[in-house]
Structures are given as C-alpha cells and as structure tokens.
Amino acid sequence: MFQQRTHTCGQLTKEDTGKKVVLNGWVDRIRNLGGLIFVLVRDRYGKTQVVFDPNDNKEVYERSLELKNEFVVSITGVVRTRPEKDINLGMKTGEIEVLATQLEIISESEVPPIYINKDEDVSENLRLKYRYLDLRKEKMQKNLIIRHQVMKATRDYLSSQNFLEIETPYLTKSTPEGARDFLVPSRLKPGTFYALPQSPQLFKQLLMVAGFDRYFQIARCFRDEDFRADRQPEFTQIDIEASFIKREDIFNVTEQLIKDIFQKTINEKIVVPFRRYTYDDVMNKYGSDKPDTRYGMEFIELSNYFEETEAKFIKEELANGSVLKGFIIPEKAENFARSKFDELVEYVKSLGSSGMIWISLTNSGDIRSNIKKIAEREIRKLIENDIIKKNSVMLMILGENSKVNQILGQLRNKIIKQEFEKKSGFDFLWVIDFPMFSWSEEEQRIMAEHHPFTMPNLEDFKKFKDIDPLKIKSQSYDLVINGYEIASGSIRIHDRTIQKEVFEVLGLTENEIEEKFGFLIEAFKYGAPPHGGIAVGMDRLVSVLVGEDSIKEVIAFPKTASGSDPMTGAPSPVSKKQLDELNLILLNELTNKEE
Ligand code: ASP
C-alpha cells in the first residue's frame, strides 16, 4: 500500500511550515542543482516543489536520482518556507517547499511522446492519440474544470427555477435538425435501425404534453455531418423547454442562466438583457446571422451617391435595381497595398461577385481607388460627407441586395481575421424573426430554417403558405456571442393542423408525415400546452468562456475532422459474427462473394 496524501499539490502555504506531509502525484520536472535535487510534483490542484538534500537524508536523495518525468510518486517530507530569493508568487505553493524524508515510486513512466510541462506544436493526431497525457496539461485541466463548473451552474440555476432534469433516449427515431442521422442496427428486429438523436427536440415537446412544464437536460446530440470548421459528430447541449410561456420568458431564463454561468465560472459580470436584432437587420448591417459586432464595420448603403455617376457600369446596374453597399475599415489605410486589394477582388469573385470597388484615403489625404478615374467626384463627396475618413479603407459591392449582403458579410469576416487582433470581452445579441423556410440549392427543395416544429408567424403563414412560403417569418431566435451562434430555439407548434400544414409546405406526403411524425401529431390530439424552448451549445459556450477557438479544447475525448478517434481507433471494423448477429452484410463482401 502506498502512503496516501495528506495534502494536494496545490494546497500548502507558509501557514503549514514545519508540518510533516505526504504528497501524491506526477513528477512534472526535475532540476539537479549539483548536490540538491528539486522535483516539482503535480496533481490536478497544482504543483509543489520537493527538495532532496543528501546532507539531510542520503538514502532518499539517492533514490530520487532514479526519478524521471511523469513517474507517479508518494513523497513524505517536512514543509519549510523558501528563502526570500526563491519565493515564486506566481505559484499557489510558491512560498514553501517540502524537504523529502521518504520517497516511494508508485509507478514508472516511459518518456512520454508529448511534453506535459511545456507548450509545443504537436500534431492534433498525436495529441488525440495520447489524449490522457494531453489532458494532464494545466490548460486542459483548467478547461475541463470550467466545463464542470458550467454544468454545475446550469443545474443549480435551472433547478432553482423549478426546471426538472429529465433524460431522453439515445436509441430512438430520426429527429430532423438538418443533418444526417447516425444509425444503429437492431439485432432483435433485423433490417430495422435506431437513429441517435440529433437533439432531444421531439422528446422535450412530448414532455410538455406530459405536463412537465419546465424541463432541461445536459444532452448529448449526434449529427453525421461532413467536416465543417470545428464541428464534432457528438456534442453537448443545455436543452431547455417550458410550457405556458412566451418568447420573453425563454429570453429571460436564458439571459439569467448565461449571467450566472459567467459569474460563477470566470467571475465576469455581464449585463442583461442582451441587444436584439431582427434577422433582416443583421443581414443588412453585417451580412451574417451571427455577427461579431465588436469589430463595428456596419454596412452602409451608398447607391444614392452614385445615381448620377459617370461610371457607366455602376449607373446602369443601379438603374436596374441593384444596390451599392460597403463598409469602412477604419485606421488601416497604411496596411492596404495594391496587391492586397487585388487579392480581395479575387476573393469576392470566388464568392460569385462580379468585382469589388475599393477606396482608400491616406493620412495625408491621397485618394487611391480602382474607380478613381471614372468616379472621383463621387469619392470626393463621400469624403466631404465624412463617410470615408483619413487613414481608412472602404470596400463596396454592387448587385442584388441579399447577394451583396452575403458577400460583404464574408468579406467582413475575412477582414476581421486578417486585419484585427482578437478582441477581448463578450458581445451578446439575440437575433429574432428568422425566415421560417429557406431554399436549399443543394437539395433543390424548401427546408425549415430552424426545424419543422417551429411556430411560424401565423399571419404570414396564412397569407403565403400556398404562394410564397419563403416570405414567412417564424417565431425562432438565436443567441450570438462573439460571432458564434451559441443558442437557438423557438416557440413551437402545438396544434396538429398547423403542424401538418408545415410538413406539407416542406413537401412531405400524408404517408411520410404519418410514418415519421405520426406519434407527435397523435400526441397533439390529447391536450398539448403552448410551449417553447432553446438549446445552448455547451461546447462552444465553454470554449468562449476560456478563450479557446476550437471546441476540441474543451471536450475530453473529441474526434478528428474525419470523425475518428486516434486513441481507440474508432470507427473500426467489427467481426463477422457481430455482423451476422445484426443480419448485415458489407457491400464489398457481397461483391467478393458474387465473384
Ligand atoms: N432542438 C433545437 C436544436 O438542436 C433547439 C431548440 O429548438 O430548442 O437546434
């Protein structure tokens, strides 16, 4: 039996001087100072300096020569105050050290394939293959501790507001959230499959029908999506639903929850209520439904300055109903050489624009622009009216309004990444009044913008459902933090007829509705309360809290971009026996057999 710790490695202070203590932990680093050996012992709580002194205890000193990084040890010793010059105030235990009187090597370690005690650029694959070592790093430990605190704050706050945590199944039927399902074959019913839930959406609505008027769950969701930046095939949501509520109630609960989480985890006081923008507003101002407004650069409509321009292509397009919009990059004219503008022109062309107009006004008042020759008069007007100020750059796009918004939005994001240091602080906003439906170019069909259980704006719905469904707004909302969609929800449909009509707009036949969602429509026959809710993306929320760009930094065992886990090797082939039990034959084996 090893000697059990009396203290953690982050606990001892000057007050403990003279005490005999036992520490358990990992060897973080060893310094051999000709005669004295200093070992930093680490556990999740911190690090403590242990001294091995041959003059004090020769036998223990000699054993300490066997130590290597990442050995697991139990050390008994006496706490002493460090000499003034060695005090390290940057460390919790920096005022003391432990003079070792006993050393027990509990477990040895080979040279680890990645450094634990210093930052280095190692490949993601290596980090994930040895994730248990990667997770020993101070930063990763801190991230997971904050993640725990977020979950605890969530449970505490929502419980205090009468929300009940109720689990819903993982083995279920498809819930459409716009992604592909992960399927699990059923052994007992060969040829049939469960789907892993893309979210608990339908179950939480059924819990409302069941009368649990305030529900939440820290729920795992599964979506089989192709790689898009920083997505995980399984991720966690703080899933919330409530009955007899209005949108304002959901906003209020979410704002208070977020406020509590920020306060309790990083001690940041945030101001509620959050600002609100309509979807049309954010698209017109920032060309994105999740803008980071800390960087400013709102779009300005400039068409009226150019209506009488001699630049023919602009004048003609404007006369044909196009708009000319742009945004100003302040204080940056010096950063923009001609070649940079040329690159940006190529970039917007790759997004489908016919070109980009740029104007830059230097500090000394020189104008540079690709339309200077043909539209100097208009440029001067923009300067006189203080729209373009000294040392700033204006980028403009001409075309159909929504396309211009979309292209300018991507251009603005690129400029933010390229030209600005990452800003500190938190920028919260709600986006409301989303369209109910959108047109998917890829699938050539109408899709639900949020999901098909969202309550449409009923006036719009009556008016446009048969003639122009894309004009219908919905009662859904998103919460955006620092340019990330952090939460998303809606008031739901609780009426069978409306629900059926929405499915019909989406092109589902009577049979498909019955087969896929019959149980929901059936439930609405038996007294469905009005209800609504929201789901907060936990991984993203934690990454914003700890200032990480990637959600992988706040998930203990994430997958790579291709959905694999280099540590366990998942996904991996299974045995023939397992396939037989599931009544499955792999296509390549089938072909082999036929040959
Ligand atoms: N189920 C939705 C989602 O996963 C959230 C909600 O509407 O509550 O995005």
Image: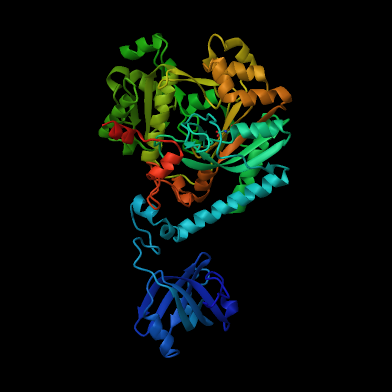
Query: Does residue 271 appear in this view?
Result: no
Question: Can you see residue 575?
Answer: yes
Where is 99 relative to 470, above or below?
Answer: below
- What colouring style does the render use? rainbow
170 over 103 or under it: above or below? above
Q: Nearer the viewer, residue 281 or 396?
A: 281
Q: In which quarter of the image is residue 259?
A: top right
Count of numbered tags: 0
Q: Position of residue 407 (x, y in %)?
A: 39, 25
The residue at 29%/17% (across/down) is 374
Q: In this view, does 207 lie to the left or right of 65?
A: right
Nearest the viewer among 47 and 299 is 47
Q: Position of residue 128 (x, y in %)?
A: 39, 52
Query: Is residue 332 found left or right of 189 in the rendered image?
Result: left
* Rendered location of residue 277, percent (x, y): 57, 28
Nearer to me, 145 or 392: 145
Quadrant in which the C terminus is drawn: top left
**For residue 539, side relative to residue 397 (left or right):** right
State which image quarter holds ligand 1.
Answer: top right
Q: Which of 90 and 462 is in front in this view?
A: 462
> Residue 267 placed where, x, y %?
60, 53
Residue 501, image quadrant: top right
- Is 595 placed left or right of 319 in the picture? left
In the rendered view, would you say 201 is above or below 130? above
